[in-house]
Image (cartoon, rainbow, N blue to C red):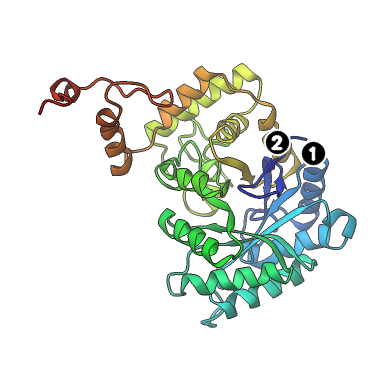
Amino acid sequence: MNYKTLGRSGLRVSPICLGGMTLGEDWGWGADEAESEKIIKRFMELGGNFIDTANLYTNNHSEKIIGNVIGNHSSIRAGMVLATKFGMNVFPGNPNGGGSGTKAIMENVHHSLRRLRTDYIDLLWIHAWDWNTPLEETLRTMNDLVSVGKVRYIGVSGAPAWKIAQSQMFAQFKGWAPFIGLQIEYSLLERTVEAELVPMAMEMGLGITTWSPLRGGLLSGKYNRSNNGFVKDSRMQVTGREAPLKEHELAIIDKLEEIAKAHRTTVAAVALAWLLSRSGVCSTIIGVRNIKQLEANAGAIAIVLTEDEITALNNLSAPPVTFVNAHTAATLLAQHGGIKINGVKPPSSPLMDVIQVGKY
């Protein structure tokens, strides 16, 4: 019963979001319709109110399944936050079937509303940035959808930080609906987003919703040193992405197993608990194929990791240093003048020994 407002908005969402990519068997690894319905209902029983899907997922089947369970019942619909995405072309051969142009957006939203069996979408995401469409056209169309009530809020996924920042400022000056959410891949095995996307989101008022928090299953607990990344009938195998695990991946999994044992929980739950503790993260999307996986992953909310455990995981999963971060760390030495500012004091450096303030 502990919800978060998404970004700079009043939209309350559960810290665990049910992902729609595994609702439907069309892609070879999801749950069938009957099991999907059970998953959705159990998710709601556990207090989850946030479901995320896309027009593309399981060939439109995901939206249809969600609509059959939720859209058909107005009393249930009112308590749920339904999010879907547009942008991917589900009409092969139609040049306006995908992308972020006005025609494509309107057409795809129309079909999503029909499949979801609802007259409004709570949160509409840009699935991936369309470099062939002017930014202002996309933002104007999304604002029009908000103005007429077909969409309540808008968000963005698959875009660089500078383009999102540009969009936020454009919307502010035009008086249009701004993005309130940013959807990014984020996990112990994918932390490069921390260089620019995460701080941008926090500065620009976007609540972060993460996808692939278990890195496609690598952090689910199924993979370890004994099988070295190969599990029969796994999603990784079905999609042809199985490969020997690297040593740094195995080291992270080893630590997760150790922490999971100490907390009497699962490796997946610990990985999710770490992610939920990260600055800016409002909700994390989980994709499950059965009730057991759902309940185990939802248990992450109750896990409180110690500072030592978080530090150990942080150190093992530290991403490559980017130019921006490296340069910022270096310039702090000169900017601070050897003193603490906002509680931060840069480490000592030979540079400080040669700087003589006010010599001339």
Outermost residue toward the bottom in this view: 94
Q: Residue 243 carries which label?
A: none
Compared to residue 13, the image places residue 256 above or below, namely above
Callout 1 amino acid: Leu
The residue lying furthest to the left in this view is 360
The image shows residue 67 at horizontal and vertical percentages of 79, 62
Q: Is residue 283 left or right of residue 1?
A: left
Vertical position of residue 131 compared to residue 84: above or below = below
Residue found 26% across the figure and 28% down from its top = 333
- Cβ atoms at labels 2 and 1 below 8 Å apart: yes
Picture coordinates of residue 88, whole percent (x, y): 55, 69
Instruction: Give the x, y percent position of residue 237.
Output: 52, 49
Q: What residue type is labelled 2?
A: Ala
In the image, 330 versus 18, the foreground residue is: 330
Relative placement, left or right, of 284 versus 37 is: left
Q: Quadrant of the N terminus?
A: top right
Where is residue 354? Give x, y as percent. 13, 23
Residue indicated by mark 1: 46
Q: Which residue is drawn at 71% across and 50% down?
A: 11
> Residue 100 versus residue 21: which sits nearer the camera?
100
Q: What element carries label 2?
A: helix
When asked about the image quadrant of residue 171, the answer is: bottom right
Q: In which quarter of the image is the C terminus?
A: top left
Q: Can residue 100 be seen in this view?
A: no
| Left or right of residue 335, residue 166 in this image | right
State the residue position of label 2. Answer: 298
Figure disc tally: 2
Q: Which numbered disc flags the more N-terminal residue, 2 or 1?
A: 1
In three-dimensional space, the C-alpha distance between marks 2 and 1, rounded to whole angstroms, equals 8 Å
